[in-house]
């Protein structure tokens, strides 16, 4: 088995190195990751500036682009052989609920799936992120299972592992995305030259975080596995929109 690894924390992130170490026991690994932290890059592609690839001392490919750039580049020209799977992570911090809309970690897995490769994203949920080995071992188990029992097309797995020793993890739950309250206000300040600048505020606190959500699972000491579907079409609204079209009476 051949696996492409990427992340959004950069090619020197500890989670990426530990993930590569664990997955090398079951597959041939190639790492293509951003040259710096690109958290929050979401699914952005670099369409104006060229991408440059450097083979780093740790044998990882470093790219001056986004996580999506890294996976796209790897699968459409950089790699000689196509991988069997894309694994993104291990992210330093959770990617729960609305976070998946902004996460570069999840976006890298999405890009792999867009380009026809089975993919999963793995994050370590905790404020200090100490137990990367736990997340790496879970990733290894899930990769083996995904290889033997592939998921339907357009599906990726978003995996969040509580920051605990493996023996303290209570189990695994299949979950849905929770939701957050609206984000905290943007922070307004000035730079040393007196020009106004803004910092994006913190994510909003948990809102829908009851049983069945990814929030609840991780907060209870369980691993959360949320299947994400890449078809964003909201089919239940078709009938309402059809009524709109009839009322508009165009054509």
Image (cartoon, grey):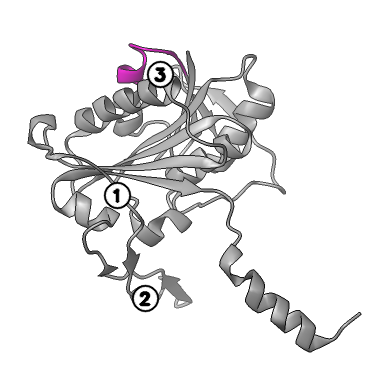
Describe residue 203's horizontal placement relative to residue 127 as left or right: right
> How far apart, in angstroms, are the residues tagged by discs 2 and 1?
18 Å
Q: Position of residue 80 (x, y in %)?
A: 65, 14
In depth, the one of 178 and 24 nearer the eye is: 178
Mark 2 — residue? 182
Q: Residue at x 46, y 48 (%)?
A: 228
Instruction: Tell me, yes or no, whether the two marked residues, 2 and 1, touch with CB atoms within 8 Å.
Output: no
Q: Is the residue 5 above or below the residue 181 in the image? A: above
> How far apart, in angstroms, are the residues tagged by discs 3 and 1?
26 Å
Magenta residues, start to end: 20-29
Image quadrant of residue 149? top left
Q: How many marks?
A: 3
In depth, the one of 26 and 105 nearer the eye is: 26
Mark 1 — residue? 94
**Which circle's residue, 2 or 1, is located before the other in the chain?**
1
> How far apart, in angstroms, are the residues tagged by discs 2 and 3?
40 Å
Q: Is residue 25 magenta?
A: yes
Q: Residues within 10 Å of mark 3 (few under 14, many from 20)?
A: few
Q: Is the residue 238 above or below the residue 228 in the image? A: below
In depth, the one of 96 and 71 nearer the eye is: 96
Q: Is the residue 225 above or below the residue 75 in the image? A: below
**Which circle's residue, 3 or 1, is located before the other in the chain?**
3
Is label 2 in a helix, a strand or a loop? loop
Q: Position of residue 134 (x, y in %)?
A: 20, 31
Q: Position of residue 46 (x, y in %)?
A: 65, 46
Mark 3 — residue? 58
Q: Is the residue 45 above or below the residue 21 in the image? A: below
Q: Residue at x 26, y 56 (%)?
A: 212
**Which circle's residue, 2 or 3, is located before the other in the chain?**
3
Q: Residues within 10 Å of mark 2 (few under 14, many from 20)?
A: few
Describe residue 125's horizontal placement relative to residue 88 as left or right: left
Q: Is residue 144 magenta?
A: no
């Amino acid at each position: 088995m051949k696996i492409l690894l990427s992340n959004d924390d950069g090619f020197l992130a500890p989670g990426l190195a530990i993930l590569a170490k664990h997955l090398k026991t079951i597959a041939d690994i190639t790492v293509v990751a951003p040259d710096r932290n690109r958290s929050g890059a979401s699914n952005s592609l670099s369409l104006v500036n060229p991408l440059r690839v450097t083979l780093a001392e740790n044998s990882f490919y470093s790219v001056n682009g986004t996580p999506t750039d890294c996976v796209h580049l790897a699968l459409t020209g950089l790699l000689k052989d196509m991988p069997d799977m894309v694994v993104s992570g291990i992210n330093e911090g959770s990617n729960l609920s609305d976070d998946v809309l902004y996460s570069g970690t999840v976006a890298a897995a999405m890009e792999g799936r867009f380009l026809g490769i089975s993919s999963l994203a793995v994050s370590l949920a905790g404020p200090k992120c100490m137990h990367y080995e736990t997340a790496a071992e879970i990733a290894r188990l899930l990769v083996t299972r995904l290889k033997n029992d592939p998921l339907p097309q357009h599906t990726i797995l978003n995996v969040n592992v509580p920051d605990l020793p493996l023996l303290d993890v209570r189990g695994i739950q299949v979950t849905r995305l929770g939701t957050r309250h609206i984000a905290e206000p943007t922070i307004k300040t000035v730079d040393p030259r007196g020009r106004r600048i803004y910092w994006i505020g913190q994510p909003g606190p948990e809102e829908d975080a009851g049983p069945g959500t990814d929030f609840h699972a991780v907060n209870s000491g369980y691993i959360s596995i949320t299947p994400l579907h890449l078809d964003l079409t909201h089919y239940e609204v078709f009938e309402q929109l059809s009524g709109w079209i009839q009322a508009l009476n165009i054509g």
